Image (tube, rainbow, N blue to C red):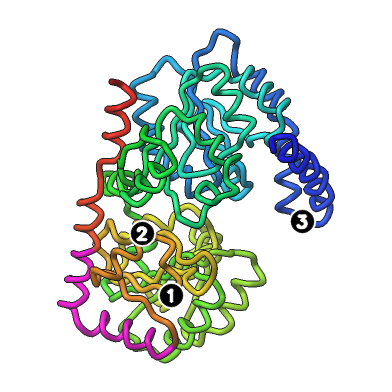
Amino acid sequence: MLFLYNLVVLLATQIVKLLALFSPKMKLFVNGRKDVFPTLKSKIAPNDKTIWFHAASLGEFEQGLPVMEQIKKQFSNHKIVVTFFSPSGYEVRKNNSIADVTVYLPLDTKSNAQQFIELVHPELVFFIKYEYWPNYLNELKKLNIKTYLISGIFRENQAFFKWYGGFYRNALRTFDYFFVQNDSSKKLIQRIGFNNVKVSGDTRFDRVVSILERDNSLDFIEQFKDNTTTIVIGSSWPKDENLLVNYINSSSDNVKFIIAPHNIKSEQIQELKNSITKKTIFFSEYNSVRTGRDLSLREYDIFIIDTIGILTKIYSYADIAYVGGGFGNPGVHNILEPATFGVPIVVGPNYSHFAEATALVNMNGCISIKDQNQLNEALDLLINNEDERHEKGHICSTFVQMNKGATEIIMRHILS
């Protein structure tokens, strides 16, 4: 089976090179991996001590960040190496401050795995949430390098739990310990013979709780808000925006909207702006003229954020949050960031793949909507009923606080 897997990986290597000729994302995927080994050679000396974290993409990086921060404190003489599989993670966080070296993970061939691990020579390895690369894992096991899964989550429909999943189960045997998010994940993995597992919870809760300790102020958002009820629409997709624009165009003048679309390509956000009948400004427009003349954001009803990296801080100004993605697959984006600020949340119908969204919908801190009428009803309720708004926001913030602590559990085990 390993022979067949290696054959598929080699074939995939050639396919992505071909796709790179037509896809900007695939071009980043391919070109970004060309300099990995020279980078490692230049930044890691043979006598350096290192610890390696692997994240599939941006969400997993953010999820693992609380553990990275604690590891960096406890192992201050070690270099932290972070790898990404996806361009959407690497391109956003390649200049992060936590890692000494940040690179793409070379594709999972036996030779790549051997060369990568020889150059990095980590003492500890952490895979975040998922991604199980057999050649890397086998090489780590062969060299007796301690390897952990953190914030892991397992589902019944995964190959590990099927009759044909022996090859995938073998990959799991290379881990020293599994820190999983919930009891169902623990029971599933115990069912196939793994008892080196502990329910630690989800480190994302620790990540969002830590956000409260930093300065989240943005003077231009405060100016735009101007003590007006403000709805923040985060990570929206066109299917979300179609409903939201209808609502915005018919809404009261006593409500303002901040929209941070998932895709900030110029043609898409321009189309979004053109569909709105109220006074609207892009962040880039404000940013380009604010040094030249006095531009008062108070005059505007809609603020479209066509940049990345500030949405989390913007949520701190929200009275209500709509989190996008819930009309697509796999579903809604990160709801924990607005939740930690005690903001009531509205999402689309596809949220069941996300435990925190499911829990908050069941607890009535989050409202799921399926169509225009339900969106209108939800937003009208939260705008007009301040008690309802505060109660749902309190449910959200309490939920986050009650679920923090995963990082402490993981670190206690690592250091014991």
How many discs mark residues in the rendered view? 3
Pointer 2: what residue?
Answer: 355
Instruction: Give me the disc on residue 23.
Output: 3
For the C terminus, the quadrant is top left
Q: Is residue 2 left or right of residue 223?
A: right
Task: Tell me if residue 391 is in the magenta stretch.
Answer: yes
Q: Hey, what amino acid is under mark 2?
A: Ala
Tell me the residue at 55%/66% (across/down).
Answer: 285
Highlighted range, magenta: 372-395
Sequence-wise, the earlier of marks 2 and 3 is 3
Q: What element carries label 1?
A: loop
What kind of element bears circle 2?
A: helix
CB atoms of marks 1 and 2 within 8 Å: no
In this view, the residue in front, 255 or 99, is: 99
**Residue 400 placed where, x, y %?**
25, 54
Q: Nearer the viewer, mark 1 or mark 2?
A: 2
Q: In the figure, 63 relative to 313: above or below?
A: above
